[in-house]
Image (cartoon, helix red, strand yellow):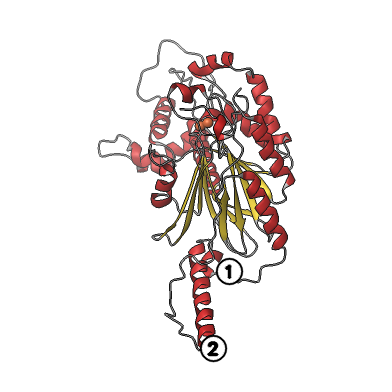
Amino acid sequence: MANPNGSAKVSQKNLDRTEHELPKHLKEDGEPNIKSLSVALGVEWHTAKRWVERLKEQRGEGASEPAYQMPDFPDEDIPVEEILEYKRKRFQKKKASFEAHTWFPIKIKDKRPIGILWFGDPHIDDDGCNQDLLDRDIALCNMTEGLFGANIGDTTNNWAGRLVKLYAEQESSVKTARRLAEWFMLDSGVTWLIWILGNHDAWGDGSALLSEMAKRHSTHKLICHDWETRFTLKFPNGWAPRIYAAHDFKGHSQWNPMHGPMKMGQMGDDADLYVAGHKHNAGYFFFENAYRQHWQHFLRVRGYKFLDDYARRNQFPEQYEGCGAVTIFDPGRQQISVYMDTEEGADVLRFKRGRRGGPDPRPVPARCAQGAATTAVHHRERARALADRLYRAAQADGLPAGRRDAPQRGAGTRLTVSRQTAGPPRSRRPRR
Ligand SMILES: [Fe+2]
Ligand SMILES: [Fe+2]
């Protein structure tokens, strides 16, 4: 019999199953117990109800024969059970992918130190983008062996919504902006490890466009993450520094530009290096986190956008330095060093790679080998070994050796932060 309601059809197989199970799932008053029936049939409650209704219609139970016959329409979509099954599969896929992309390892095959040049917000299509500085940092990546690139986000202005009118105030059109972004990613020659998508990139279809470009990155796999990325660099000797980079970390202080990253460093996921951009200011801080028992570095890169109308109108004083920064990861010393002057960072990396070319004989502390981090255990062991050596030498010389456990805190740690010379001379800067 045709379905007078014209709603979704039920296959004869499912009706037969329902007919078979129904007698076992009747209430005292003879009405079907839909809940237990749905469990027995392995379908949703509302599906079981619909099947019972169709069965009743087939048996001629319930409503009297209508005085008309509606056409038997085919279903316009797949059964909801299939949609639910797809949903479950999609969720499992997305969850597995998300977990694989969180704290993923990047395996470094080189035994020598490597560096990452962190490009601050490029805003490459903005009239205020300092192309000379950007070119300089691109050239450093191309000319320095072992120096990789990472983009902290806001590749283009990508104006959207009510801000789309700002395209009238800049020379680069949307089309040109996308061409510039494509060049930066695919043709600038930089070997990218990471591209982060900032708030500007996320507007409109910017993220989708950049992700498509990343898929076309033919030289190596480029990881393109929305807002943040967490990964480890796994060196051949087992050292695995943890890096947490985000377009920005939540939290703000007018007194401390590192407030957000430091908050994450002490209250959020543990890492050895935190890197942020977004606020168009630069800064660097590091300290030994006693609770986490290792050094933590907090870096903020300024970006390449100068002549910022938004900053001027809102009275944010413009900085001139720290557009990008170089972090060097030295597996031999198991330490991270940070250079706000990218040229100096590249120089030091070249020196370190030349000087420390062979395999490193130093055993890796167990904690570091497990990827748990970090330098604290390593430094303590080195400090104690140094104290022992001095003690024995003093004894051999017949000199008072002092306390054998004399404080050696920080022995072997070294950090260089130097002024970036890329901005205009201070004397020529506008007074504020
Ligand atoms: Fe931003
Ligand atoms: Fe930005």
Q: Position of residue 94 (x, y in %)?
A: 53, 41
Instruction: List the residue tagged with mark 2.
Output: 396
Frontmost residue, 104 versus 11: 104
Frontmost residue, 135 versus 404: 404
Residue 199 is left or right of residue 343, and the answer is: left
Instruction: List the residue tagged with mark 1.
Output: 364
- Counting other residues with Cα less than 10 Å from the Cα at mark 1, is it few (<14), some (14-19), or many (20 or more)? some
The reply to whether dot 2 and dot 1 touch (C-beta < 8 Å) is no
Relative to 286, say whether 359 is above or below. Answer: below
Identified at 66% across, 53% down, the residue is 349
Identified at 55% across, 24% down, the residue is 307
Relative to 91, say whether 49 is above or below. Answer: above
Q: For the C terminus, which image quadrant?
A: top left
- What's under tag 2, amino acid-wise? Ala
Frontmost residue, 16 versus 147: 147
Cα–Cα gap, marks 2 and 1? 31 Å
Residue ranking furthest to the left:
29
Question: Is residue 95 visible in the rendered structure shown here?
Answer: no
- What's under tag 1, amino acid-wise? Val
Residue 141: which quarter of the image?
top right
Q: Position of residue 283 (x, y in %)?
A: 49, 43
Q: Position of residue 360 (x, y in %)?
A: 66, 68
Frontmost residue, 202 versus 62: 202
For mark 2, give the secondary structure. Answer: helix
